[in-house]
Image: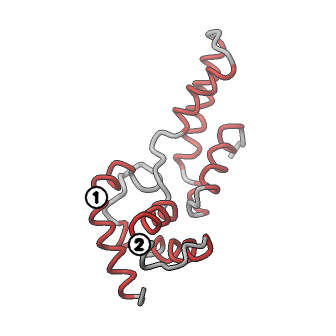
Amino acid sequence: MELNYFTLYLRNYLRDHSFPHEDLEADIVKNNADAATDTYDTERKAGNTVPGATELALADLFVGIGLSRMEASADILEEEFSDRIHSLEPMVVDFWSQKLSDDDSIWESFHKDGELGLNQELVEEGKGILITRIDQFLTTHGV
């Protein structure tokens, strides 16, 4: 895979937001980076400024990129379960977020085909279901 600015940008984003390592090589990364590069080149040729062309290209770069399970887990733990996780130290949140993100049964209905990560709209709409599943997981694990 040829590396370009947009490929590196998206891979760094995925890494920084705790997406699984294999997601860094997903087809959507290359396809979105290619689309972003095309948009950037087209906009620059049309006379758009570098920041303007970059902004438009970044919109293409993130099409179909959702939330990581780790990120969603951490957010829900901090918002909904702070009373049960007495120490919300980052290390504790990271530990439980990793455990939750590894359990496919929690997340099975929050993906859309062709997208990477969790679909943000589905997560928002099904937040109550997620909270219930996480509650059951924590209870099962003695938390």
Q: Quadrant of residue 137?
A: bottom left
Task: Specify whether 140 is left or right of 26.
Answer: left
Q: Nearer the viewer, residue 5 or 54?
A: 54
Give the amino acid type for the residue marked by disc 2 in the picture.
Phe
Residue at numbered disc 2: 81
Mark toward the start of the polypeptide (1 vs 2): 2
Element under disc 2: loop
Q: Residue furthest top?
A: 47
Q: Is residue 48 above or below residue 101?
A: above
Residue 139: quarter of image: bottom left
Say whether residue 61 is left or right of residue 2.
left
Residue 47 left/right relative to 64:
right
* Separation of marks 1 and 2 at Cα, in angstroms: 17 Å
Residue 77's place in the image compared with 41, above or below, is below
The residue at the point 71 percent across, 37 percent down is 5
Q: Nearer the viewer, residue 51 or 47?
A: 51
Element type at marker 1? loop
Instruction: Give above or below for 42 relative to 38.
Output: above
**In the rendered image, which quarter contains the C terminus?**
bottom left
Q: Residues within 10 Å of mark 1 (few under 14, many from 20)?
A: few
Q: Measured from the top left, where is residue 1 in percent x and y?
A: 68, 46
Q: Residues within 10 Å of mark 2 (few under 14, many from 20)?
A: some
In the image, which is nearer the foreground, mark 1 or mark 2?
Answer: 2
**What residue is drawn where x is 50% and y is 79%?**
86
Residue, disc 1: 126
Q: How many marks?
A: 2
Colouring chosen for the image of the structure: secondary structure
Question: Mark 1: which amino acid?
Answer: Gly
